[in-house]
Image (cartoon, coloured by chain):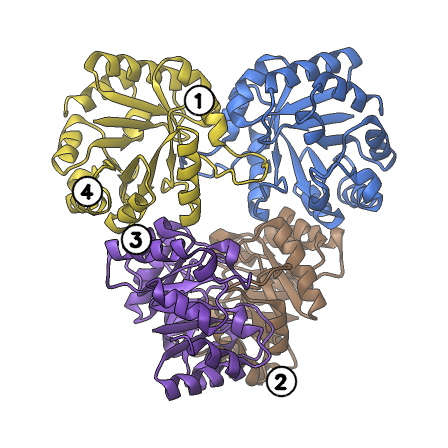
Chain colours: A purple, B yellow, C blue, D brown
């Protein structure tokens, strides 16, 4: 089970959330990671929590300006990066090249996709995880595991046909333990969530509530 | 066997090429299509040759300005469209949505990709064809079937694992019958080519030469 | 006075609109142009009406696939191209390079922009015209000349400070003669409009109605 | 005089460079800022040196994933951001909106552009500074102030006509004091440089050398 908390550009306290996630992760022995804005990555790494980037740019062979590199993430102790989040979509070729660059830098990757056929495509590119998130449910508070269970089930099946070793995360609208247990029943091996924690007045309690579903 | 001639933005006579392709196609009973610039699409359709677009935009739900729509192509008698050519790369989600829009408009699609894993990804999205074109060989005159036979062979295998009904075209550097027969031996069921015909002083002869390899 | 009718991707009869625009243009001696989808450009040119493209790609030095080139437009008898429409926004550098390529190919350009400071920026790049279109009013049926007269007045002033020889067109929500005369009073030397004609059941009558405002 | 050192994605020690820049800035009373990769921004701020971002994303009204926000930069003590670097080009409308968002967050901006007419356009959008950098000279080691003095002189003149209060920085190929003094003679009020410092074995000495030209 892998819980990845995407803080997006929400106004929130990434350190408070990181500390809460870290202590619960240690206590319950569940893998929980936090993906803050890149400007907060180093501080979040220092809390001890598993830390992910929300996006990583393909470096290619040229020096560039204003991009987030695999080398920079790796050196900072970041564990992996989301790629192709529906709020940061990438070219097919960029996803492919970014996964390869991440892998060379010993970074894990979660490639997001909207539906089962895109999940199969993403799985073909050999990331560490894929995450299915129907864009219309992101930030909606309506859990994909209830609103569109077939999409989750079909995504798990699609990914499994391509490569059964790549786990599928379930995203979009997940906010409590009930949603999490529904996702697990549908075959998801992890959860990608954002507003449910980032906008919570009590992140510690919200994360505990999530984990009650495992 | 499917030969798709991409005229790109080359300065050439699309009508002369279309007529040559059409007469050879009829004579030898081989499927040959021409993809001119969009401004020439209607004239090329009128020659009777099978006509393809070089690119099609996803329409989505909003009216747009300056895009090429599936409705426009379909109405004009165009048969299909290239998508994600390495000179016109698309977001993963755009490829998916464009294939669906094309299919609804009864248009075929060829999705281009750089390497076997991208070919598997493209095949997952259920286009009519996929085409493998290593970008470094495009326009090089060095045939992929000789320079990188493993890429073609692996692309055919990758696509076959995902969906054996979707034929793989071989592109990049193909210019004569020998290249074509090499591609066929590697498992390709068609050829995507450009400069070999578009820059030829005698397109009729160049197309005939290509077909000598079948 | 210059009336530029952008047909966008609307389902409409471009030839009927072109013929109506052409006959009224000749009759009233007013400059009226039609910008159809690129697939219809050649047919629209043949009606005799002044014909514009909705978008033109920067060619650069490389051959490309699926783009609309200045050479292609020029050869087809097209008079000019919209650039940076709010439904087809461009990089600052692309606008600059496209204006230069258009100019070398003897094509005119209308660069669209959202507000007075962008209009000043666009004017600095030396296009033939600039067009101010607040995005929130596009397709709204609410004429910019009424909803936001200050934007039009300020755009005319901004452009004038940079280069008083470059006329400002007024776009967004224009549909009748009253809107046109309001735009002229605010300093516009032309009109860019779309749905008011493209969605009209009687384009001839709608164009005549527009011109009653001059 | 303003010296802005862009560390791009170069492998270098941003803290060493920041400390050197800070001590020389204090000693000589010259404004010097360092723009590290975003992951290093907070550490660089802590050295006391004036710190800039290499890029900032327009936030708009929606929450986003994997972007660099004006709020995040401002809260971290960053002073400003480069926008539209030739390695990170932006839409005209994005530049406009980003300058406004930066200004609301009390951040300064340097908008990069390739040539005098783009400089005039950038100046119209009211950034704090503009920087002229012919792309072909970036990273070349050939100083723009020698290779293309007219571009610098014309850029200063272009910007001055639009708004004489916005200073012009000179970039591309600057690496020593002689280049800097040539740029000042051409009317530049600052320098944007990168490889000359970021790839230097002795950044302290390289910065001192630069300042010998003032």
Q: Nearer the viewer, mark 4 or mark 2?
A: 4
Q: Nearer the viewer, mark 4 or mark 1?
A: 4
Q: Which residue is mark 2?
A: D26
Q: x, y (%) of residue A165?
A: 24, 64
Return the mark for residue A85. none
Could you confirm whether marks 1 and 2 are on the same chain? Answer: no
Q: Are marks 1 and 3 in contact (CB under 8 Å)?
A: no
Q: Are marks 4 and 2 in contact (CB under 8 Å)?
A: no
Alpha-carbon span between mark 4 and mark 1: 30 Å
Q: Are marks 4 and 1 in contact (CB under 8 Å)?
A: no
Q: Which residue is mark 3?
A: A158
Which image quarter holds the C terminus of chain C?
top right
Alpha-carbon span between mark 4 and mark 2: 64 Å
What element does badge 2 sit on?
helix
Which image quarter holds the N terminus of chain C?
top right
Q: x, y (%) of residue D178?
A: 55, 67
Q: Which residue is mark 4?
A: B156
Mark 3 burial class by Cα count in 10 Å: few <14, some 14-19, many 20+: many
Query: Where B40 sits versus D201, above or below?
Result: above
Q: Choose top left, top right, bottom left or bottom right for residue C196.
A: top right
What element does badge 1 sit on?
helix
Could you confirm whether marks 4 and 1 are on the same chain? Answer: yes
Q: Which tag, 4 or 1, sits closer to the chain's start?
A: 1
- Chain for disc number 2: D
Q: Which residue is mark 1?
A: B41
């Amino acid at each position: 089970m892998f819980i990845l908390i995407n803080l997006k550009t929400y106004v929130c306290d990434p350190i408070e959330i990181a500390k809460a996630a870290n202590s619960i992760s240690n206590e319950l022995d569940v893998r929980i990671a936090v993906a803050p804005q890149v400007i907060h990555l180093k501080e979040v790494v220092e809390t001890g929590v598993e830390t992910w980037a929300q996006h990583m740019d393909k470096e290619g062979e040229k020096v560039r300006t204003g991009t987030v590199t695999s080398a920079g993430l790796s050196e900072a102790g970041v564990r992996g990066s989301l790629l192709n989040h529906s709020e940061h979509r990438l070219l097919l070729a960029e996803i492919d090249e970014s996964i390869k660059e991440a892998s060379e830098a010993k970074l894990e990757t979660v490639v997001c996709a909207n539906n089962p056929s895109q999940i199969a495509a993403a799985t073909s590119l050999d990331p560490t995880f894929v995450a299915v998130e129907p864009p219309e449910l992101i930030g909606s508070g309506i859990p994909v595991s209830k609103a569109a269970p077939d999409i989750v089930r079909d995504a798990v099946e699609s990914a499994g046909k391509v490569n059964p070793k790549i786990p599928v995360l379930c995203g979009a609208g997940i906010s409590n333990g009930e949603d999490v247990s529904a996702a697990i029943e549908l075959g998801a091996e992890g959860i990608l969530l954002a507003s449910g924690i980032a906008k919570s007045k009590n992140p510690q309690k919200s994360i505990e509530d999530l984990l009650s579903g495992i």
